[in-house]
Image (spheres, helix red, strand yellow):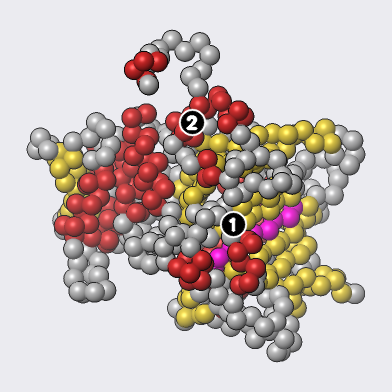
Amino acid sequence: MLTRLEVEGFKNLLDVQVEFGPFTCIAGANGIGKSNIFDAIEFLAYLATDTLVEASQRVRGASGTRGGDPRDLFWDGYRDHQRQITLAAEMIVPAEVEDDLGAPARATATFLRYQIVLGYSAPEGEGSVGRLRLIGEELRHINKGEASKHLRFEHAAATFRDAVVHNHRRGGAYLSTEDREGGTVINVHGDGGSFGKPQPRAAARAGRTVLSTVATNDHPTILAARREMQSWRRLALEPSALRAPDSLTDSRNIDVDGRHLAATLYRIAHQKDDVTGNAHPEAIYARVAGRLSDLAGTDVDSIVVEVDPVREVFTLFLHEKGGLRLPARALSEGTLRFLALCVLLEDPSFTGLMCMEEPENGIHPANLPAMMSLIKDLAIDPTLPPDSDNPFRQVIVNTHSPGVVQLCDPADLLLAEVKTHSSAEGLSTRALRLLPYAKSWRATSRAHSFTEADVTYYLLAPVGAQLRIPLGIAG
């Protein structure tokens, strides 16, 4: 779970500090850079796996495409000046993970703060492009006694916080940055704390983050942080991917674009439970169909995934109450997206952070309440302990839809807006900032916030509206 994100110098995120709960909705106008928050989160996830070059190419550039110039990632990146990005994340990581060889690893602390500083190296000759370089990297634990100050969203201390925040650390940082005569090094410290010498890695020659190089259980807490960051994903469900049948050899986990929907539902339905050792496909299919029937305009009787042994594919079918039998490829875009989220809700193995762009797309206004209820149900309930019925999932959405904003608890809202700043060189720049609701847990006396008056355009009919419900009927 990502509980706090700090960004300096990344795209139009000049100086952003934001806290996240299990569910967060970022609302703001088109074109102001809301998606850059998701880009920063996604960038951290890529840095936990890929090289610096690969990570920079996977993030959206200035034109909205991937694989562009790394200067696209920097604030004012094309001006001739020193460029630097600082990213920091406070996160709750899983206590137990597997390393790349399948061996178990247990973290000595589960509430951590990771920070990375990146610079830019100009091209060394014609025909080459510049690259990112590692300037600093740190990973430290947050003491259990300090956890309540960092986890300010409403939660149960005994059943939630005590279940996910553990600390047996007796030393300092797990990763630290040190300036030496020969250059900057990133020190890797063992989980035993002060026992043993740190292992230095030269930052100047690093082609990737040090965290991304930890693949075995020799450093279990660094590995747990890496696994957590790798679970941060941007969910962008595409109709063509959702409609595609799956071969019997395909992955049985939904991809970020919705591919492998049928195979995933089949795996969940036929998975044996831990209590009886039996599978309950009829119950799983019935629950998914029941959720889907919440959508206005659907007439769902049942859902099933069938195996075609001749073609060797899984195909998802929806049976309507009138007897019509429809394959996934015949379903509407909105129905498919809702169906994919219903399947994810049934999958306890699907954990981590999900970022979702404009969940209202393809959804009829009458179905927004069902969609938003489903999205909120995907996130963990912090008043209950995490388990298979309450998986450790987190959801962040962004939107410009009044309907979505009106369906959110104000405490879950962040208002995105651009603010003019004066740079050290005297230049006026416009940067994104996120404002919490004034009466919410995020609001502090030191930071700006918003009230209902600041979001009236989300709450009232637009000026010039031609069709309204008469006041007498609305009341």
Please give the label number shown on residue 152.
1
Residue 269 seen from this side: yes
Q: Label 2 sits on what residue type?
A: Ser
Image spot of residue 226 (x, y percent): 57, 67
Q: Is residue 270 left or right of residue 465?
A: left
The overriding secondary structure of the stretch rendered in magenta is strand
Q: Is residue 93 magenta?
A: yes
Frontmost residue, 336 versus 275:
275
Q: Label 1 sits on what residue type?
A: Arg
**Separation of marks 1 and 2 at Cα, in angstroms:** 27 Å
Image spot of residue 113 (x, y percent): 66, 65
Q: Residue at x 90, y 39 (%)?
A: 425
The residue where tag 2 is placed is 401
Q: Which residues are magenta?
A: 85-94
Residue 66 seen from this side: no
The part of the image, by quadrant, that contains residue 327 is top left
Q: Is residue 442 left or right of residue 422?
A: left
Which circle, 1 or 2, is nearer the viewer? 1
Frontmost residue, 52 versus 429:
429
Q: Residue at x 47, y 13 (%)?
A: 465
Image spot of residue 421 (x, y percent): 80, 36
